Every structure is written in structure tokens, then in C-alpha cells.
């Protein structure tokens, strides 16, 4: 295993350990190849994704370079080799790790390989659409599991609301971050795919696929795919970094977790979920806190997101989903997030504005959900937000038809007036067929297809027009459409089949 790549492909598709829920087919939840989304199995009992092609076994043509310990000074990962991260590999203060386009980096399974860019260190990982950089499990195609390795951690010197000095990221692995330099530069991540990360460092303390601790605005984060991660896809702990073109593909916990005073900008972000791949702690599209205590510590978590599409696990009313899928966006603990020009669907709850302080922030126009389409959700969050007698006075008691414009004194506008939410979500539940209801919003129903998701809205979609950038930061590109995609697929470079790709 540590000397050859792709030597024995035992089965096609993704093999993951799932926490609950059985379906016909592979039904043993203790087996390493258990996945309730899988419809069939081989004669030997191994699970099969019928949608995925079987990869062709191929001998490696590249040598594996073992990487351990600290990186000081300049180090280059070239694309003529494959690199394996053993335990914690740290780019230390003054160190610069350059990664060439097309380079593949494995995380060692046994030692929980993790790449940490410490304060003052830099990563220069500039892939291209034709030659992206790939971080993934060292296991053979078909045998990779979420949590096979750690992930990428970037520690910057920007502000957060945890401490005036250094703070350590959860897990206790020495990821120290924080300071006062909001323009700090930790390097570049462009056209980078991160697959099968999220190893548990301690019980209930996993590494995210991409963790950003107090990362400054001098850092470039663009065109990043996090796929099949065991924890959050992207998590920001404070900082001011701006990000574009982010993809969370079938990750386990939250797609976009925002904490501890993150106040940067994010445009064009896309997430799609698997129907039973969900965390026991509760899986959300957004999970947002000012801090863990919901304090008024500054800087507030007040980032601005625009052109986000979050596709939950519920394809239609007959689709069974994991019981701990929760909200398209759980906005809680006194945060002041801004969400514009976006589209949320397929979760049990749409927007959950949770807690007295958070609702006050919404009423004061400090927390904003604006010019956003919410459809194919069952209701608002558990506090009844959006129901008669609460914040959205006059909205239907079941919260299904969200107001086309904000009631007097309430600064939230949560749907496009031209979109008929009732037609999308009927009284019997989610749409009678995938085609009928997904086409109501002009969404390609193949968006759930393994390996080949149709991400572009179809002609006539309500999402293709009506975006507004009035009063928004200069960072944002003015486009006509809501959601992550218009008529151009900026994620066409992504490897949606990373479960079975032989990186040799």
C-alpha cells in the first residue's frame, strides 16, 4: 500500500463508515464498506455504486516522497512525484511550501497526516483548471473513507474575538492563530481539491477539510473543492480572508462553519449533500456563531456571503434522509452574518435565526438574509421564526410561503417575489417527482448524480436574474444571477469522481 498506487481496486464508488440508517443492499453498519446510499452489492458482499464506473487498475509511474516534521526555508513539491504527509507536517515561521500544478499529496492514514501552515509560514499552492493540486487519502480507489487523514490548516495573524493574543484551534495539535494584522498573507490556494479529510484528532474533535484560523486578507483562497470530508468542509475562526469559488461536495458535518469574528467576504459557493451522510451533532449548510458562548466579543462574526447555493439531501418527498440533517443555515449565538443573492433547498429547515441576541441583530439589520430564494424546505427553525405571531408577523403559520418583501420594521427579504414557493413545496410534502419540482426553479435534477452533478440552472430559472449588489463591499463581482452558478460552470475542473480516481 505504501509503495504502489491503484494496485487492487476491490470495488467501485465510495466506501464510508456510516453512523446509522440502513437500506436494502449493504446493510451491515459495522462493515468498513457500509454505506446506506448504496443500492447493491457484489457476490462477496462488498458495496457498489451502480452509477460509478469501475476504475482500471494501474501501476504507479511516480515515486512517493515521504514528508515529516517541520518545513523551514523553501521547499517545493513537484508534480513528477507524489508526496505523503506523515503526522503533523508544519510549515514554520519563515518557511515557504510551493506546490506545482498537477501535484498529488497523500495524507498518511496511520499517523493522521495533516498539513499545518503556522503563523509566518506560507503555502504557495497555485494549481490550474487543467492541472489542479489534489490532497487525498493514500488508499486505493474504491477503498477511501472520509477521515482517512487530517486536512489543511492555515494559521494567520489577523484578528479574532477569542483573545488579544494567540489562540489554539480545537483539537490541541498546535494550530496557534490570531493577532492584529488583518492584511496578513499566508500564501495562495488556487485550484486545489481536498478529499477524504477530517480525521478525529480527539473524540468529537475532527480536523476540517480546510481550516482557516485568523487568516488575513493578503491570503488568496480561490477555486477550492472539499469532498467527502468527515467534519466541516470549510471553517473560519476569525480573520479577514476573502474567498471565491468554493465547493463542498458530500461532506459530513457543516458545509460553511463561521466563527470567532470572521469578517471577510465570500462569493460563489456551492454545496450538495448525500442523503445519509450526516453528523450525529447535526448537519447544516451554514453554521454560524459569534463565539461558542454567544457573547458580544468583538470583532463580531459579520462576514458577507453572496451567490451561495446549498442543495440539501432531500431530492423529493420520497427521499429518505439522515435524521440529524437540520438547517440550510443555522444562524445562532449572536452573529451578524450577511447572506445575499443565494439559494437554499432540500433541508428540513430553511433559515433558523436562533437566540434572542441573534434575532435582535436581524431586527437591527446587522444580520441580513436578502434577495435569497428558499424553497423545498419544511419549515423555519425550532423557535418558529417566520410564523404568525413571531418576527415575520402575517406570514402563514406553517412558514412555507415566505414573504416576498419584508414586513414593516423587519429588514429581511427572504425570497424572490416571482418564485412560487407553494408550487415547489405542496401540502403533501416535497414534490411528487424529481423532474417536476426541481424544474420549477430551473434546477437541473441531475444535481444529485454521483460523479456528474448538473450544477447550472436551466433556461428560464428564476435564479438567472434579479441579483442585487447595492451597498455591498467592492470585493463582489456584479452578476445578474442568484446562487453559485449562472450560465458558466466555474467548477468544471472539479473531480466529482475522486472516490475512484487513480492518482498515479
Image (cartoon, grey):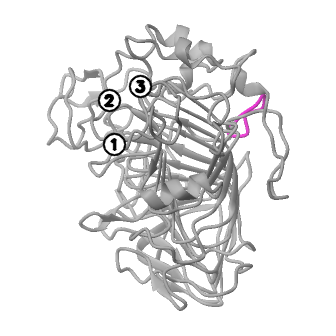
Real-space Cα distance between discs 1 and 3?
26 Å
Q: Which residue is mark 3?
A: 398
Viewed as shown, does residue 152 lie left or right of 149?
A: right
> 426 above or below 194?
above
- Callout 1: 10 Å neighbours few (<14), some, many (20+)? many
Quarter of the N terminus within the rendering: bottom left
Residue 321: numbered disc: 2
Q: Residue at x 51, y 89 (%)?
A: 166
Residue 278: numbered disc: 1
The image quadrant that residue 49 belongs to is: top left
Secondary structure mostly taken by the magenta-highlighted segment of the chain:
loop
Q: Secondary structure at mark 2?
A: loop
- Callout 2: 10 Å neighbours few (<14), some, many (20+)? many
Of the two numbered discs 1 and 3 on the same chain, state the one appearing first in sequence. Answer: 1
Is 127 or 426 nearer to us in this picture? 426
Q: Secondary structure at mark 1?
A: loop
Amino acid at each position: 500500500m505504501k509503495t504502489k498506487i491503484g494496485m487492487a481496486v476491490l470495488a467501485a464508488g465510495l466506501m464510508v463508515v456510516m453512523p446509522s440508517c440502513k437500506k436494502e443492499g449493504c446493510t451491515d453498519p459495522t462493515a468498513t464498506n457500509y454505506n446506506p446510499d448504496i443500492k447493491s452489492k457484489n457476490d462477496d458482499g462488498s458495496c457498489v455504486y451502480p452509477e460509478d464506473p469501475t476504475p482500471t487498475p494501474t501501476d504507479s509511474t511516480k515515486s512517493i516522497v515521504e514528508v515529516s516534521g517541520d518545513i523551514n526555508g523553501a521547499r517545493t513539491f513537484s508534480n513528477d512525484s507524489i508526496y505523503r504527509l506523515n503526522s503533523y507536517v508544519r510549515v514554520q515561521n519563515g518557511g515557504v511550501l510551493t506546490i506545482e500544478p498537477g501535484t498529488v499529496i497523500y495524507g498518511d492514514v496511520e499517523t493522521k497526516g495533516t498539513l499545518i501552515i503556522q503563523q509566518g509560514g506560507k503555502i504557495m499552492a497555485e494549481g490550474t483548471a487543467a492541472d489542479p493540486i489534489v490532497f487525498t487519502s493514500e488508499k486505493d480507489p474504491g477503498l477511501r473513507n472520509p477521515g482517512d487523514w487530517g486536512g489543511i490548516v492555515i494559521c494567520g495573524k489577523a484578528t479574532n474575538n477569542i483573545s488579544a493574543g494567540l489562540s489554539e484551534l480545537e483539537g490541541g495539535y498546535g494550530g496557534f492563530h490570531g493577532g492584529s494584522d488583518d492584511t496578513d498573507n499566508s500564501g495562495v490556494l488556487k485550484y486545489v481539491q481536498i478529499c477524504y479529510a477530517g480525521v478525529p484528532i480527539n473524540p468529537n474533535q475532527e480536523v476540517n477539510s480546510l481550516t482557516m484560523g485568523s487568516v488575513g486578507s493578503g491570503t488568496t483562497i480561490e477555486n477550492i473543492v472539499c469532498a467527502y470530508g468527515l467534519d466541516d468542509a470549510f471553517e473560519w475562526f476569525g480573520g479577514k480572508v476573502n474567498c471565491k469559488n468554493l465547493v463542498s461536495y458530500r461532506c459530513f458535518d457543516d458545509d460553511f462553519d463561521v466563527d470567532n469574528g470572521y469578517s471577510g467576504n465570500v462569493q460563489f459557493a456551492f454545496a450538495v449533500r448525500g442523503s445519509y451522510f450526516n453528523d450525529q451533532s447535526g448537519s447544516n449548510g451554514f453554521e454560524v456563531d459569534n463565539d461558542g458562548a454567544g457573547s458580544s466579543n468583538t470583532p463580531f462574526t459579520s462576514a458577507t456571503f453572496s451567490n451561495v447555493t446549498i442543495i440539501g439531501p432531500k431530492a423529493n418527498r420520497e427521499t429518505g434522509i439522515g435524521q440529524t440533517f437540520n438547517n440550510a443555515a443555522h444562524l445562532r449565538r449572536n452573529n451578524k452574518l450577511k447572506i445575499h443573492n443565494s439559494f437554499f433547498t432540500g433541508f428540513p429547515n430553511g433559515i433558523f435565526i436562533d437566540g434572542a441576541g441573534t434575532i435582535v441583530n436581524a431586527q437591527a439589520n446587522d444580520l441580513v438574509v436578502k434577495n435569497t430564494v428558499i424553497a423545498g424546505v419544511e419549515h423555519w427553525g425550532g423557535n418558529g421564526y417566520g410564523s404568525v405571531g413571531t418576527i415575520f408577523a402575517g406570514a402563514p403559520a406553517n412558514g412555507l410561503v415566505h414573504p416576498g418583501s419584508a414586513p414593516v420594521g423587519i429588514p429581511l427579504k427572504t425570497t424572490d417575489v416571482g418564485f412560487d414557493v407553494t408550487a415547489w413545496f405542496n401540502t403533501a410534502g416535497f414534490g411528487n417527482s424529481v423532474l417536476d419540482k426541481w424544474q420549477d426553479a430551473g434546477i437541473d435534477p441531475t444535481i444529485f448524480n454521483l460523479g456528474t452533478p448538473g450544477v447550472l440552472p436551466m433556461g428560464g430559472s428564476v435564479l438567472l436574474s434579479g441579483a442585487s449588489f447595492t451597498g455591498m463591499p467592492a470585493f463582489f463581482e456584479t452578476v445578474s444571477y442568484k446562487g453559485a452558478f449562472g450560465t458558466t460552470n466555474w467548477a468544471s475542473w472539479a473531480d466529482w469522481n475522486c472516490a475512484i480516481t487513480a492518482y498515479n
